[in-house]
Amino acid sequence: MDPETWGHRRLAAAIVARAAQDARSGNGHSAGARLWLSSSDWCAFLLDSLGQDRDRVTAWVDGLEPIRQAALI
């Protein structure tokens, strides 16, 4: 694998990893990260380029604990 391809794969992996971290963190970005991981065409492209199965990622997202919502005052 040439260095340019390696760099692109590392960047793709970092983007997906950050989205996964946000999806499970409850940090205010969880809902958006979950949606991106399970339905974004760009995420599907990145996962495919990494050899990862989109259906497995979607199943993982679906299995996460529901996002807690702050009480309304």
Image (cartoon, helix red, strand yellow):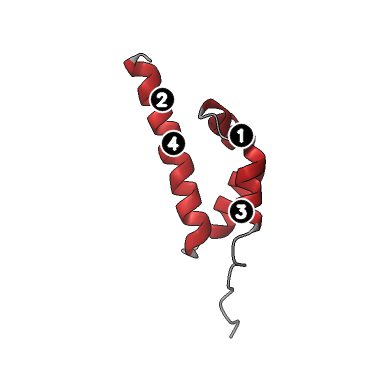
Earlier-in-chain disc, 2 versus 4: 2
Could you tell me residue 9's position as x and y percent? 42, 27
The residue at the point 60 percent across, 82 percent down is 72
The residue at the point 50 percent across, 65 percent down is 26
Residue 13 in the image: above or below residue 23: above
Looking at this rendering, what residue extends furthest in the left direction? Answer: 3
Could you tell me residue 42's position as x and y percent? 59, 33
Residue 29 in the image: above or below residue 12: below
> 40 or 24, which lies in front?
24
Distance from label 4 to label 3 (Cα)? 17 Å
- Image quarter (top left, top right, bottom left or bottom right) of the N terminus: top left
- Label 3's element? helix
Q: Which amino acid does label 2 sit on?
A: His
Contact between marks 4 and 3 (CB within 8 A): the answer is: no
- Label 2's element? helix
Distance from label 3 to label 2 (Cα)? 24 Å
Distance from label 2 to label 1 (Cα)? 15 Å
- Label 1's element? helix
Q: Determine which of the numbered discs, if any, sits on residue 13 in the image.
A: 4
Earlier-in-chain disc, 2 versus 1: 2
**Numbered disc in front, either 3 or 2:** 3
Q: Determine which of the numbered discs, if any, sits on residue 44 in the image.
A: 1
**Residue under circle 3?**
61
Q: Determine which of the numbered discs, if any, sits on residue 8 in the image.
A: 2
Earlier-in-chain disc, 1 versus 3: 1
- Label 4's element? helix
- Image quarter (top left, top right, bottom left or bottom right) of the C terminus: bottom right
Q: What residue type is labelled 1?
A: Ala
The residue at the point 61 percent across, 34 percent down is 44
The crowd level at tag 1 (other Cα within 10 Å; few <14, some 14-19, many 20+) is many
Residue 7, located in which quarter of the rendered image? Answer: top left
